[in-house]
Image (cartoon, rainbow, N blue to C red):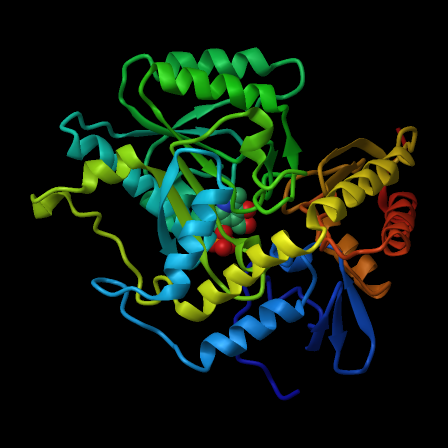
Amino acid sequence: MSQSQVWHPFTQHALEPAMPEIVLTEGAYLHKADGSRILDAISSWWVVTHGHRHPRIMKAIETAASTLDQIIFAGFTHEPAERLAKALVGLAPSGLDWVFYSDSGSTAVEVALKMALGYFRNIGAPRSRIVVMEHSYHGDTIGTMSVGARGVFNAAYEPLLFEVDTIPFPAAGREQETLDRFEAVVGDRRAAALIVEPLVLGAGGMLMYPAWVLTELRKIAEASGTLLIADEVMTGWGRTGTMFACEQASISPDILCTSKGLTGGAIPLAVTLATDAIFQAHYSEDRKKTFFHSSSYTANPITCAAAIANVEIWQNEPVAERITALSAKQAAGLRRFGDNPFFTDSRATGTIAALDLRTGSAGYLAEIGPKLRAFFLDKGLLVRPLGNVVYLLPPYCVTGDELDRLYNAIEEAGERFGSRA
Ligand code: PLP
C-alpha cells in the first residue's frame, strides 16, 4: 500500500508496526491481503457477538438499503425504528419503556447523562452531580471522559472535564466501603445519577464485581431518589452470561445504554432506554422541556434493520446455549492458570475472561502491552491486552479448539514475558 494518511484511534503511530490490512471478515476471523487469517479473540473491540458477517444481518442490511437510506428523525419515523424499539422494550429489564436512538456507545452515555439532568430540571428539583465508580470507562467524548476514570486516556483534556463524585471499585472484601461511600455521597440529594458498568468494568482492566453489590447500589439510589444509569454498552447482548448484566442483580435501572452487540457488531447503532417517568418529565406543552439531543444519523433505518436481525438471531438460533457453553469453556480455560506463577489473578464473568500477567509495571501504558499484542499477532491471534491484563472476549461462534489455541498462547506469553511469583 502507498503511504497511509489515516490517523487510527488509540494508536501511537510512531511505535506501531506496519498494520495488517484486512480484506475479508468471516466468523471468528479477519483475513489479511496475503491470504493468512487472524483469530479475533476480542470481537473487534467487543462488538461482534455472533461472529463476523452473520448472513441474517448482512441480508437485513441489503434489504433495508433497497428501500431506505437516511431519514430525518425529528418529526418523522420509519418501520425499522418502531419495530426495533418494541423489541428492545420487550427484551430489556422491565420499566424501560422509551427508546432513544444514537450511533455510538459514547453518545448513548452522553444522552443518558443529559436525560438525568433534564429529568430533575423539568420536575422542578434540579440536581447537578453525577456519581461514578472508580476505574470506569464510558467513552471518549468530553462528557463520557468526565464520568470515566481520570488518567492517561484523558489527562490532556482535563480542563474540559466536569467534576464528579467517585465511589471506590467494590474489590473483593471491600464491597461495603463502596456502598457506604455511595450512601454518604447521595445524602445531600444533589446527585442526579450514579452511572455504572454492571458486573464488569471493561477498559478499566476487565475488573469484575458480584451482582449483589449492584442490587445494593440500586437500593441506595432508589432511597435517595438518585437515578441509576446502567452502561451496558459492553456487557449487553449476552456478554456476562445473560442478555443484560442487570438481570443477574435482579434490578431495572432508570436508564440503560447499549450499543456494540446491538447490531451483532455489524454496523454502528446505540440506544438509551429510559423509564416512563423520565420521558414524562420531558413531555410538556412547555417547549423548553424538550429533550434537546440529536445527531444527523439518529435511528438510521439500515442500522435499525441490522439490529432487528440481531434480535431475530437471538430468537431463532440457540444463542443462549452458545453463551452458556462459551462461559463454561472460559471458566475451564482459566482453571489451567490456578497455580501458574506468571499470573497474579484470573477471573471470568460469563463469556469474558481476564488474566493479570505478573510484570514489573502495570497500567495501560506499561511497556508490556504492545509487546504482548505483537507476540499474539505473530501467532495469528488478535488479543489486545490492557497493559498487563490479558483478556478474551471472543465472538460466540468461537470453537473449543480455537479457545485452546488462545489459552496455549497465553500460557506461552506468561513464560516469555511474566515474572515468577
Ligand atoms: N461504555 C462502555 C462500557 C464501553 O466499553 C465503551 C466502549 O468500549 C463505551 C461506553 C463507548 O462506546 P463507543 O466506543 O461505541 O463510543
Identify the residue shown where x is 80% and y is 72%: 37
Image point 70% across, 62% down: which residue?
51
Extreme front residue here?
Answer: 316
Q: Position of residue 49 (x, y in %)?
A: 65, 55
Q: Residue at x 45, y 21 (%)?
A: 218
Q: Is residue 112 shown to the viewer in this render?
A: yes
Task: Give the mark count.
Answer: 0
Camera-side residue of 322 and 127: 322
**Apparent side of residue 419 relative to residue 383 in the rendered image (left or right):** right
**Considering only vertical position in the picture, is 5 above or below 230?**
below
Locate residue 18 relative to residue 262 in the image: left or right.
right
Is 72 on the left-hand or right-hand side of 213? left
Q: Quadrant of residue 312?
A: bottom right
Asked if residue 392 lies left or right of residue 174, the reply is right
Q: Nearer the viewer, residue 244 or 4?
A: 244
| Residue 412 rendering spot, x and y as whole percentages | 92, 49
Quadrant assignment for the C terminus: top right
Residue at point 23%, 62% (across, down): 74
Residue 220 on image: x %, y %: 42, 15
In the rendered image, residue 260, in percent from the top left (x then y), is placed at 55, 54
Q: Quadrant of residue 113?
A: top left
Name the one closer to the observer, 327 or 348. Answer: 327
**Relative to residue 132, is residue 310 depicted above or below?**
below
User: Considering the image in quadrants, where does the N terminus appear?
Assistant: bottom right
Residue ranking furthest to the left: 286
